[in-house]
Amino acid sequence: MKNIVILISGGGSNMAAIVRAAQRDNWRERFGARVAAVVSNRADAGGLAFAREQGIATEVVDHKAFPSREAFDEALAAAIDSHQPALVVLAGFMRILTPGFVARYQGRLLNIHPSLLPAFPGLHTHQRAIEAGCKFHGATVHQVTAELDYGPILEQAVVPVLPHDTPEALAARVLTQEHQIYPRAVAELLPAL
């Protein structure tokens, strides 16, 4: 079985979109794959309840309990590895990972970012796109490398920036697209794993 481990920090809407796609499109039969676990760095992450309701194993590795980023990443990797992952998917996981962690999962660590990378890496992407006068914005699924919000692009979705957009309105339109492209990007990788 190709186990997928999803990392979240909050509500987990992209995680939920992936779980629903796996169920709807029968990834277990088609690819021999399943979402095996959802791991969060926050015990209050809303997405954990959804995962439990779906019968998916959940774990919390609280980053505040560790003296360094490296120590946290080591504990996080141990939690992930206990599920023997074929793929590790960052879905709103709001921690910068160390180069050692990224190297451990090289080629099988994915992220989704709310911009058309390479434009606007980092935070506040929607505000920055509006301020820059962009006519289009969007989301990118990419393989994770040691450089923040960088790495081979697997999928992108484009949305228009409307004349009176607020960051919140733009974010909502981008999120709808994220829920479509992230499950598709994961599914497209599964046959090769």
Image (cartoon, rainbow, N blue to C red):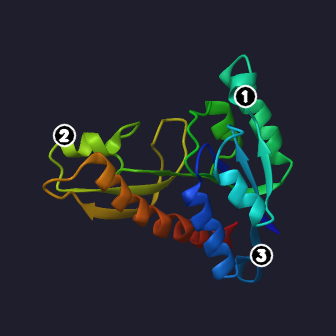
**Residue 171: image location, x then y, percent:** 35, 53
Report the side of 153 relative to 53 (left or right): left
Mark 3, Cα crowd under 10 Å, few <14 / some 14-19 / many 20+, is: few
Q: Nearer the viewer, mark 1 or mark 2?
A: 2
Q: Secondary structure at mark 1?
A: helix
Residue 164 picture location, percent across and down? 15, 53
Q: Amino acid at mark 1?
A: Phe
Front residue of 11/119: it is: 11
Q: Look at label 3 and name its amino acid.
A: Gly
Mark number displayed over residue 150: none
State which quarter of the image contains the N terminus: bottom right
- Going from N to C along the chain, the mark reached first, 1 or 2, is 1
Q: Quadrant of the C terminus?
A: bottom right
Residue visible at 26% across and 40% down? 128
Reply above or below: 155 against 137: below
The residue singled out by tag 2 in the image is 131
Question: Does residue 176 appear to the left or right of 18 in the view shown?
Answer: left
Q: Residue furthest top?
A: 67
Disc assigned to residue 72: 1
Which mark, residue 32? 3
